[in-house]
Amino acid sequence: MMNQTSTRRQPRQKLAPNLRLALFVVCIELLGGAPVFAGAGEKAGRLDTAAQVRLGAQLFADPKLSVNGKISCASCHQADKAFSDGLAVALGIEGRKGLRNAPSLLNVGHHHAFFWDGRAPTLERQVLEPLTNPDEHGFARIEDLLNKLRAEPTYRDAFTRAYAQAGAPAIRADTVAAALAAHVRSLVSPESAIDRFVLKGDKNALSADAQAGLALFRGRAQCSACHALADDAGTGRVQLSDQQFHAHGNHVYPMQNAVRGRLAAGQTRADMAKANPAEASALGRFMVTGVVEDAGGFKTPSLRNVARTAPYFHDGSAATLEAALNRELLGKTGEVLLSATERQQLLAFMRALDDDAPAAQRRQAGR
């Protein structure tokens, strides 16, 4: 939700991928021919075919993509919840709890980094990682999933139609990633009230209370500093995220000082992750970059559909929109910046950020 206001603004930079996944990608590129990867971070503006998007949608909804046949991508990314799941943290195979909240997938095709900590530089690389996470889809090796798919005649046919390539099997790690990413890229919000008001100048699109809330959002509440009211991707949609990584709050400086102490004592990020995974998860962007000032920093989520994506923050620790807003306001200066009436106006604006269309139309938008 309204992610941490930065103690410093960071320029976009080349993002360090997860090491295990990066090595895996290198291997499949060497052994499996030319990669199909072509996400927003690799080939901007690519167009997926209808067959690729359909195949991705089938994979996305199929529990066969988990080792026990009970968890699908759609388990944690549900259309009626703006492709989030309504839980504090995601649940994987055997009910295993993850460490972070499952964010909405709407409009992420134009993002420049993925996961809360930005460890995946492309959508294609992001969609593969949960498949071999022991607490999510649970496969020990990606090859185990590929063999499962290759045993299905319908998948053999669908992959051949979508990714026929002379001399190479159609069902490969890169084609699974490409198909899933093609589907996720198709999850685009329809035009909504905020788009008509901000981008088209339709002054009747928002109620009086929502317009008052927008003025606060842009002004004293300082929300738009991170949740940008802009269409940088040229989609005709207000993105409501700067896609940067921010940290703030009373906990951040003690956290960063503790990290400095651990590094000085010779601990590595891998040591920290092994010793206490939950604590390491709270370090956020630091676990990717190794920069102490990034400790406690997380990617700014979009506020589109924010009223339907509770609970909030990377760990789902704010159960309601009101609680999340109050925490943000207190976190900026240590005091409540707005009166009770003004907070209600700001909430009215955030509730107006919902997409107009029902879930079925959201699923089809962008195809």
Image (tube, rainbow, N blue to C red):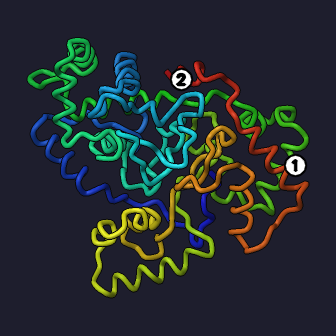
Q: Residue 284, relative to residue 308: is it above or below?
A: below
Q: Which residue is mark 2?
A: 363
State the residue at coordinates (12%, 21%): 166
Check disc 2: other Cα within 10 Å, few if <14, some if 14-19, many if 20+.
many
The amino acid on which the numbered mark 2 sits, given as a three-letter code, is Arg
Q: Residue 82, relative to residue 313: is it above or below?
A: above
The answer to whether residue 276 is left or right of residue 219 is left
The spot of residue 328 in percent (x, y) is 69, 62
The spot of residue 45 in percent (x, y) is 43, 34
Q: Which residue is mark 1?
A: 212
The amino acid on which the numbered mark 1 sits, given as a three-letter code, is Ala
The answer to whether residue 253 is left or right of residue 64 is right
Q: Which quarter of the picture shows residue 70? A: top left
Of residues 6 and 283, the one drawn nearer to the viewer in this rendering: 283
State the residue at coordinates (42%, 63%): 278
Q: Is residue 124 visible?
A: no
As measured in the structure, the alpha-carbon distance from the residue carrying label 1 to the one carrying label 2 is 32 Å
Label 2, secondary structure: give it.
helix
The spot of residue 293 in percent (x, y) is 48, 75
**Residue, far front:** 94
Of residues 222 and 285, the one drawn nearer to the viewer in this rendering: 285
The spot of residue 201 in percent (x, y) is 80, 36
